[in-house]
Each structure stands twice: as C-alpha cells, then as structure tokens.
Image: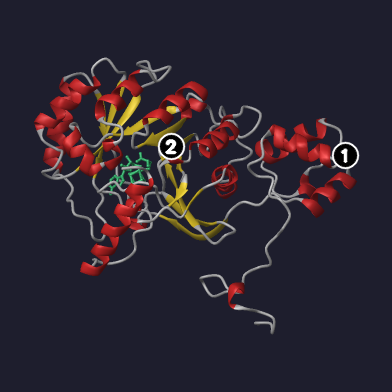
Amino acid sequence: MMSDAASLQDFMPGGQLAPEPDARPNLIGLDRDGLAALVKDMGEPAFRAKQLYHWIYNRGAARFEDMTNLSKAFRAKLEETCRIDRPKVSMHQKSKDGTEKWLLRYEDGNEAEMVFIPETDRGTLCISSQVGCSLTCAFCHTGTQKLVRNLTPGDIVGQVMLARDALGDWAQTEEAGRRISNIVLMGMGEPLYNTDSVMDAMRLVSDGDGIAIGRRKITLSTSGVVPDIRRVGAELGLSLAISLHAVNDELRNRLVPINRKYPIAELMDAVRGYPGLTTSRRVTWEYVMLKGVNDSDADARTLLRLMEGIPSKVNLIPFNPWPGSEFECSDPARIESFLAILHRAGTVATIRKTRGQDILAACGQLKSESERIGKRERLRLDALRAEKEAAVGL
Ligand code: SAH
Ligand code: SF4
C-alpha cells in the first residue's frame, strides 16, 4: 500500500515502492586494507579483518550471524553498522543448452547482465564492467546504448559472488571441480575504460585466500585501449583477448572506432609486449564474422601476417544480429574457409559456439529485446554515437 508520505521518487521504474535506502556500507568490494581500516575504526584487534575477509570472500558468507568464530558482540556490531549485499536478481533465465543468464539490479536501479556457460571441462562466467559502454563498435548492440555508469569494484565482484551463490559453488575447491572455473570480462562494457575498478575487482577474485580463481583463468577482453593493455599486463597478468574484427585500419576504424585513436600497428605492439605470452598462454583474437565485410580469404591471410611471432589463438565469432543492426553473419561455408586458412598455417583457431540463443544470451545480444527500428530511432542512435565518440576523444 502506498503511504501518504510516498512521493514519486519512492517508486522504482518497475512501479513497486522502493525500499528505504540502506545507509550501512556494503563490505563487498573492500580489500584487506579496507577491511583493516573498518575493523580498526570499530576498535577491534587487527586479526579480525583477516577473519572477516575469509568469511566474505572465501566462504561466501552473506550474513554476519554465520561467522561463527567472531564474538557474538562483534557480530552484532557488524550487523548494525555494515552489510554484505549482492546485487539483486531482476531476471534469471536458463537455456535448453544449460546456459544461464541473470539480469542484475544494483541499488541505484541500474542493471547489468551476467551469463554462465557450462561446458564439459569447464564453466565460464561472463561478467559486465559497465552499465552500457563508452564505445560504439558498429556490430555490437551494447555499443548503441549510452554509458550509464562504470561498475564499482563491489558491483563487479558482487557478480561473481552472486553466481557462486546461485550455482552452489562456494564449498567447491578448484581440485574438486568448481562449476565456475573461468571468468571472462566479455559482458556489457569496455573493461579498459573502467580499468581501476576492474583491476581492483580482479585482485579480489584472483586472491588465493579469497575467491581464488587464478589470474590465468580470468580473461579480459578489450576493443584495444592500448595504454591500459600495458598497465594490466604489468600489474595483473590476466589472460588477454583482443576484439580485432578487421585487419586493416580503414575497416577497423569503421567497425571498432577506438582504432582511430589506437591503430592496428600500435595495438599489435602492445600485445607483442604483453608479459607472459607463450604457446601455453596465448592471446585470443576475437573476430566477428560479417558477411562480405571482413570475411574473405585475403582477410584471413592478412590476419596470419599480423599475428606473426605472437603466441595466438583465433576465435571466430558468428555475428549475432540484433534489431537495427546493419550486418549479416557470414555463411557457414565462408567461415569454414576462413578457418581452414588459419589451420593450414598451423594457427590455433576455433569457431565460437553460439550458446543460450533461446534466451538471447549470445555475444552482443545482451539487452536486445526491441523490434526493428525506424528512421527516428536511427537518427537518435547516430547522435548518441557522435556524443559517445566525442567523450572518448574520437
Ligand atoms: N568491450 C569488450 C568486451 C565485451 S564484448 C570488447 O569489445 O572486447 C565481448 C565480445 O563480443 C567482443 O569481442 C565483441 O566484439 C563481441 N561482440 C559484440 N557484439 C557482437 C555481435 N553482435 N555478434 C557477435 N559478437 C559480438
Ligand atoms: Fe563496447 Fe565491446 Fe560492444 Fe565495442 S564490442 S561497443 S567495446 S561492449
């Protein structure tokens, strides 16, 4: 029931009465130092921070009352002043093929998507780094949405923690076979336009005393923000995937506009210098197959030349159309021919299997729900693209 005092701001977009905002700080996203400062402020001995860290990130406790080795008094104090809240789930779908998709809602009402893709030998969680995206890649549906905001470290780690809750994965160890063995930053957003928060979050996710998913099992996918590729390489050493999609600057400027700022030669230099690349730890080149645009045999041969000397694997991604998209997916025979050229040269290359098609969980389809678009909508998108590109200096 609506109370007399309720005003318009009390309503969420969905129409329900918004809950009172919870002023207690959310501990998810705090690292060891953050928890140490908190514990000190509360007048507790320093070792409590370590215990708290372990409960939150290693055991996945969502309630202070479950933290049985903390004194009752401390637990009560924590309960009063702090919380450990995951994002809320506003929608959850499971595909026939086992792929699961969650629409997550943060406290400010913004939403981001997360997908879990089970395979026989691994389980990959695909997470988001931004609500919307700073960039405007021509074939990507997220690129048509404005950047609403960067996700915070807590928002990003919260995705992984929620997935572990949902999949019953906290009690598992790596050896016993966790359901989530790998993480890819391939959901909404460009991680390297939110580098600090992504790096803080991945430090928490990869910490062996915490969530403990190894750095090599975490793949950061970027459209090519060169200075930050170097930073991630130097400071964190995650596995790297590059959204290449075109083998000459003219076409890449159009498909992946960040290329106008960091052209292919600079991108290749940055990847060549990425620490730790070996034949057992390759960079992944993502290459979306667009009919008649980037899918010729000559393109495949140029790709081989570009990758020369770099331990590489190529992931050909069948284009997933969305309402208003101007491309078609290459024919299967064309994709096979492109793949065969790479294979004949001894390159590791695969075609990405489209998963979760029935729940629109495939690459570039996140948040696709509307129908064909009209001229007005096209004009609006053009204006938004210009605005976004100006914001990142393109
Ligand atoms: N912003 C980052 C990560 C998110 S996109 C990046 O661009 O790398 C994850 C992958 O999906 C990227 O390789 C992206 O180019 C690809 N992708 C986007 N839209 C797609 C579509 N409609 N069909 C197939 N792949 C798409
Ligand atoms: Fe953003 Fe990546 Fe989509 Fe480009 S492909 S618009 S960088 S999410």
Foreground pick, 344 / 28: 28
Foreground pick, 370 / 179: 370
Q: Residues within 10 Å of mark 1 (few under 14, many from 20)?
A: few
Ligand 2's quadrant: top left
Per the model, the C-alpha gap separating discs 2 and 1 is 38 Å
Q: Disc 2 on helix, strand or loop? A: helix
Sequence-wise first label, 2 or 1 = 1
Residue 345 horizontal side relative to residue 57, left or right: left
Q: Residues within 10 Å of mark 2 (few under 14, many from 20)?
A: many
Tell me: is circle 2 under 8 Å from ligand 1: no
| Residue on which the image places disc 2 | 192
Return the x and y of residue 287 as percentages of the image width and height: 25, 36
Foreground pick, 81 / 158: 81
Q: Disc 1 on helix, strand or loop? A: loop
Amino acid carrying label 1: it is Gly
Return the x and y of residue 289 as percentages of the image width and height: 20, 41
Please indicate, yes or no, whether residue 360 appears anywhere in the rendered image. Answer: yes
Residue 392 horizontal side relative to residue 63, left or right: left
Please indicate, yes or no, whether residue 69 appears anywhere in the rendered image. Answer: no
Q: Would you place residue 43 above or below residue 388 in this image?
A: above
Q: Residue at x 37, y 36 (%)?
A: 222
Q: Residue at x 54, y 44 (%)?
A: 156
Q: Quadrant of the C terminus?
A: top left
Return the x and y of residue 282 as percentages of the image width and height: 35, 22
| Residue on which the image places disc 1 | 43
Residue 269 horizontal side relative to residue 196, left or right: left
Q: Residue at x 74, y 50 (%)?
A: 63
Tell me: is circle 1 under 8 Å from ligand 1: no
Return the x and y of residue 25 as percentages of the image width and height: 71, 50
Amino acid carrying label 2: it is Leu
Kindly indicate the quadrant of the structure image that contains residue 311.
Answer: top left
Residue 285 - label: none
